[in-house]
Amino acid sequence: MVNELDSRTIGSLRFPLAVMVVAIHSYISIDGWSYSEIANMGVGANVVQFFMMAIGHVLSHIAVPTFFLISAYLLFNNFGDGDVSVWKRKLSSRLKSLVLPYIIWIILYVLWLAILDYKTILECGLVEWVQAHGGLSCFWCCKTWNLERVDLWGNPATASAPILVPLWFLRDLIVCVFVFSPIFFALFKCRNSKSLLVIGLVLLSFLYCTQTSLYLPGFSSHTLFYFGIGAAMALQNTSITELFSRHKYLIWGLFLVLFVVEVALDGHNTVVGNIIYPFYVMLGVISVINVFSVSGLMWGGQKYTFFIFAFHFFVLPLVGMAIIKTMKLVTGCADVNSVSFVNEFPFLVIVEYCLKIGLTVLLCMGIYALLNRWFPKLSNFLCGR
């Protein structure tokens, strides 16, 4: 049963976690900057890159794992003995809150891209344009990155997403809910023996810490670990805030140490940083839940969370282009992404990154407010409510 502190903490976390997701996708690529040549890039470029790495490549990466954990915690909350009526109610609810918004948002994004790219469609044809954007695979896996990354066993660990990239979270969550939730229920709802619980947690931890690749898009050891931890706590009637508050000062200290190390190593974008990455994220998830449970911080933006998460990819490129044009006018420099520009105006580039995040979030909030005022049923449908 979710207690009052758990509920308040989870509610207060949602908005800042959504902003972290925007921060990940707002990362500014500086032409000619290479991590391997960091010593030769100049003080200004190094300061800017380390600032953006700290926010976009390291700190913000605790957001989605936290979402997975609390999603499982809420799914299995008040689950009882898991009879047919409970499963029917829970899964029916997730069809409305996960599957339908997932499909609708991808369709909307494809239409949005078509509007922006209408000249190409007129020249090449609609069928060719759709095929170039992945065809039906745009609903599951048409974007890939980290093509050279491998797990500790040397197997490919390529990341993937549907055409609306942030929705890889919903895709993986759908797999967890509709494929793995019965398995987690069987493992973690132990009555007479804790052996299955221990075996399940050990297996998930092993897959996660070794970052073992599961090959199939939508199936991730990273995802399963946090979803499994949330499921285990809920099915064992464990308070998320009470459990994570134990030894909180030690955990905060370890988190800060690994945070500094990960920033120095550019997170999971380097070999050593990638080995440390799972442990850093795990401490980060515990720490952020601790901070909000202890401080009592509350945000008024909870209702905007899902819309920001799904919609920011629509407007983020437009916001970025507007900021770049403004910077060019202000500075008179044609290439504001060059190393020489960043070395000359490092503070301005940091402001650009922060503005890109802030304006995108505010624009999403404004559009949602208008949509919710004029078409409340539509806004509720788009947000899975």
Image (spheres, grey):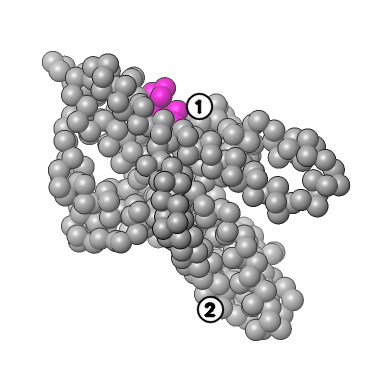
**Marked residue nearer the N-terminal end (2 or 1):** 1
Amino acid of disc 1: Leu
Q: Nearer the viewer, residue 361 or 252?
A: 361
Name the side, left or right, on which 142 lies relative to 47: right
Q: Position of residue 222 (x, y in %)?
A: 43, 36
Q: Above or below — where is 180 with respect to 17?
A: above
The image shows residue 94 at horizontal and vertical percentages of: 38, 32
Spatial CA span between label 2 and label 1 = 42 Å
Q: Nearer the viewer, residue 24 or 82?
A: 82
Residue underneath mark 1:
214
- Which residue is the extreme one toward the front? 374
- Neighbor class of circle 2 (other Cα within 10 Å; few <14, some 14-19, many 20+) is few
The residue shown at (22%, 27%) is 79
> Which SS type dominates the magenta stretch?
helix
Question: Is residue 281 highlighted in magenta?
Answer: no
**Image spot of residue 107 (x, y percent):** 60, 40
Is 178 placed above or below 1 here?
above
From the viewer's perspective, tell me whether residue 31 is left or right of residue 38: right
Three-letter residue code for mark 2: Phe
Judge the density around disc 1: few (<14), some (14-19), many (≥20) Cα neighbours within 10 Å.
some
> Magenta stretch?
174-180
Q: Which residue is mark 2?
A: 347
